[in-house]
Image (tube, grey):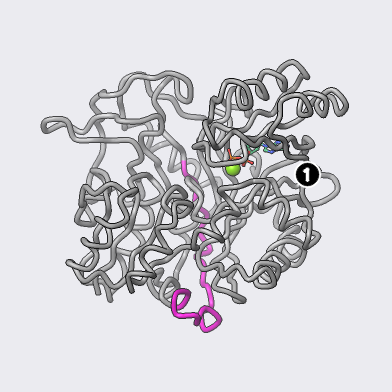
Amino acid sequence: MKVAVLGSGGREHAIVWKLSQSQRIKELFCLPGNPGIKQLAKCVPLPLHDHQSLIHWAKKEAISLTVVGPEDPLSNGIVDSFLAAGLQIYGPNQKAAQLESSKTFAKQIMKIYGVPTAKSASFTELGPALRYVKENGAPIVIKADGLAAGKGVTVATSVVEAETSLRASLEKNRFGKAGSTVLIEEFLDGEEMTILSFVSGPDYLTMVPSQDHKPVFDGDQGPNTGGMGAYSPVPHLEKWLSEIEKMIVDPMVKGLQKENIYFQGILYTGLMITKEGPKVVEFNVRFGDPEAQVILPRLQNDLLEILEASTGGNLSSIKLKWKQDACVCVIMASGGYPVEYKTGFPISGLKPGVDDLVFHAGTEIFGTKLVTNGGRVLNVSSLGGSLAQARTQVYERLQSIHFENLHYRTDIASKAL
Ligand SMILES: Nc1ncnc2c1ncn2[C@@H]1O[C@H](COP(=O)(O)OP(=O)(O)O)[C@@H](O)[C@H]1O
Ligand SMILES: [Mg+2]
């Protein structure tokens, strides 16, 4: 069969890499893809916001299944468009994607079904929002309600910082429509963890846990990024897994059913493990980036079979199988990211064909050279017999990859070690 993946980052490279091992795929495409993905799939430069062009292309190529990587097309209703055109697609429809595209919507569902999360209130007016912050004090968390490419959250350590963030959203329109509603949330103290689940209506399969590293510098210092590295498993938080499934994933899946929201795709549960137990930080509706880059290398099943069982309403026939190996991924970023950085620097030291788990995130071909083209440039993953071993291997591999002004964290996975 012919399969297409939508997206162009490290997550999509990992999805394409995993799907490329499926015996049943005759031809693999990625739209628009990137230079790393190009080694495994045919890249087609179509814009993801133009649903009609994508549908036209998928019909012309007789694509059997399209897999959506990022959140934007999902929240724009790409799944609804494909289904209406009679095409199979993996991912939640627009209504279900609101779990990610509106943090207020997600909070409402959590509230109805008693899912533990930070106390919060939503605001569209500056005055009441400022009053709420004054009453509650800092630390406090300010969140743009909608999709803001990972830049919409301020963990404010002072009331002044919270006020500045509220003004940026509600007065200066910093995030446009995505920030015209703001969620103000109780600060949760603890350690973060990600749980991904394949969900298909009433059925779900929970994957092995992983942990992302949001802040740009070692020791969780500096501004938040899209993610500077991840690892799986997360042994020191493992004891919480059954409670997370019972208190969070299960009630969410059942709750969505009760609300008549058909969820078919990946439910990403972002958690804070607090002194009072696990609480939801947010939901996403697709694979995490960089979580996919450590989860998919550990997955033993044919990913295509899982995705097909999911779109076919047959997910309960699947049993997930995992490698015992641990996986660690370190993001090689452009120095200055996530604030200001330069791109266009040549990248050296890659070994295409040998470097199985070096995923491209922000690269492009300029002339004949591979150059940097984004904040997060490469995602270097490694599988090892233990987390310590995987970590050593990853940092060894990084030593021989170069581009000007590169930056990476040196402490990925250290919380577990
Ligand atoms: N209530 C909270 N308490 C403490 N930290 C938080 C809280 N909410 C979010 N954060 C931090 O901010 C990051 C981004 O928040 P999140 O809700 O995941 O938004 P997004 O991923 O859409 O930017 C989280 O990964 C976490 O590090
Ligand atoms: Mg998040």
Q: Which residues are magenta?
A: 309-329
Task: Residue 137: say if magenta.
Answer: no
Quadrant position of the N terminus in the picture: bottom left
> Which of the pair 298/244 is nearer the observer?
244
Q: Amino acid at mark 1?
A: Ala
Is residue 233 at least partly visible in the picture?
no
User: Is ligand 1 less than 8 Å from the beta carbon at label 1?
Assistant: yes
Residue wearing tag 1: 118
Left or right of residue 29: residue 163:
right
Please, what secondary structure does the residue beneath circle 1 have? loop
Quarter-wise, where is residue 120 in the image? top right
Task: Residue 324: say if magenta.
Answer: yes
**Residue reaching furthest left?**
368
Q: Quadrant of ligand 2?
A: top right
Quarter-wise, where is residue 182 in the image? top right
For the point 71% across and 29% down, the residue is: 125
On screen, residue 30 above or below 177: below
Is residue 124 at least partly visible in the picture?
yes
x, y percentage for residue 24?
A: 28, 76
For the point 56% across and 67% down, the residue is: 263
For the point 51% across and 39% down, the residue is: 229
> Which of the pair 85/278 is nearer the observer?
85
Quadrant position of the C terminus in the picture: top right
Left or right of residue 136: residue 14:
left
> Which of the pair 200/219 is nearer the observer?
200
x, y percentage for residue 81?
A: 38, 63
